[in-house]
Image (tube, rainbow, N blue to C red):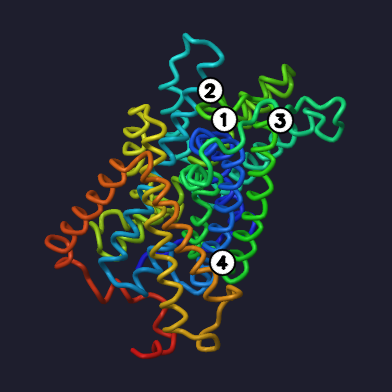
Amino acid sequence: MERLSKVLGPMHIWALGVGIVLVGEFMGWNFTIAKGGSIGAIIACWIMGLLYVSLVMINTEIGSVMPEAGGQYTMAKYLLGPLAAFNVGLMLVFEYVMLEAADALVVGEILKTLSPHIHSLPYIILTLVGLTYLNYRGVYATLTFNFVITAIAYISIFVLLFATKFYSPSESLLRLPELTNGLPYGWIGIVGAFQFGIWFYLGVEGTALAAEECRSTSRSLPVGALTGMVTLLIGATVTWFVCSGLVHSSELGSSVYPLFDAARATKMPFVVVMLFIGTILSCMASANGCITDASRAWFAMSRDTLISEAFAAVHPRYNTPYRAIIFLLPIAIAFGFTGLLDQVITFSILSALLVYALSAYMMFKFRRMYPLGSIDRGYIAPWHPLPAVVLIVLTLATFVGMYFGYWVNMISGFCFYLIASLWFVLHRYRKVDTEKLLSAGVENWPRPKGY
């Protein structure tokens, strides 16, 4: 079986998780204001933070003992079986490919602010091709680069914060009472805002996809993932605070790049330039991480024969899943061509929510099969089963919120995964090599309790 290089540390896991997600603080989250108002948006932000803290704890416990790349796909393979694993793998691929397409759309829109005559498409394609080549050459350099650009983008948010002089009420540029609109739709608006509140954190669960490439999975995964969540919770709150105090809620709820619009509202050239750079870098970091995660999921499915084994090849020099990396590039570009940012985001979110619901179930099953003390864990999620209960309840509530505005998209997404499942059962399953599917790493585990 082809193996990937063990070269990553906690810094790289942080860069992968935060790098993918940080773009959500530069765009997308603000649709919560259109759904639930200004107060509904910040409540949704914190509640979705609770969802993701629970998810990261679950993924980190299970992922720290899994022997292969693939994250939640690998968990599903060992805990739920081939059909569930196929669906989870497909959901992960589409979650990250759609997010990558959304990143490309935002890059195109913000480039147009320089001049209406700029044709953004060549820049979008060039960026995606360049990041794909970086992934092709090696994961260590890819995520080291991601760490640098993510850190710069994150710092730009605090540059904007301090530029507002929030610490001095007499001089502050923030006008929260004047520009915010409270809770115009009541509690139901908060539920409606859950769908885009997820955008503050969507993708951080992808840290588990790099488990096979960590030098010490039991250390790198918990440290990188949990510090990443703290980083994102702080950044999300600051983002809502400065944007809501600088841009009127009626404009903020439909902005393509809310932090950049907030920077322009300060009328400070340095701040505007810094946030322009931060927005571009956050999109690049997100797209870069999405390429890494989507290709690992596709590679893992191919290596396990759930899809064609052609994508399981590892580059002889760079030790990367290069065929999977290259194959997914035109798919991301094609979705970027649609120009439908909210539709692309919605399909990404739907795919992620389905994975979250299955992750909560897998946590229950994992603790049943392997009680504490039966195998070595790099991290133990505290307060079980509370994180899994919180995860499934908030995931279902988010489905309800999504139904209010995007029920057609939901039905289309469910139908897509149903058709894919039928294809797998009726056509592909007979070609699956079950020995190869379950051959790696778990042979030294004890027999699961009750099996």
Give the labeled residue for mark 1.
280
Locate residue 84: give its quadrant. bottom left
Q: Position of residue 96 (x, y in %)?
A: 42, 46
Give the labeled residue for mark 3.
177
Q: Earlier in the sequence, mark 1 or mark 3?
A: 3
Give the labeled residue for mark 2.
110
Q: CA distance from mark 4 to mark 1?
A: 30 Å
**Viewer-nearest of labels 2 and 1?**
2
Q: Earlier in the sequence, mark 4 or mark 1?
A: 4
Q: CA distance from mark 3 to mark 2?
A: 28 Å
Residue 146 is at least partly visible in this image: yes
Front residue (pair 303, 58): 58
Front residue (pair 287, 312): 287
Q: Are marks 1 and 3 in contact (CB under 8 Å)?
A: no
Residue 315 is at least partly visible in this image: no
- Horizontal side, residue 447 vs residue 190: left or right: left
Q: Element type at marker 1?
A: helix
Give the labeled residue for mark 4.
57
Q: Are marks 2 and 1 in contact (CB under 8 Å)?
A: yes
Q: Earlier in the sequence, mark 2 or mark 1?
A: 2
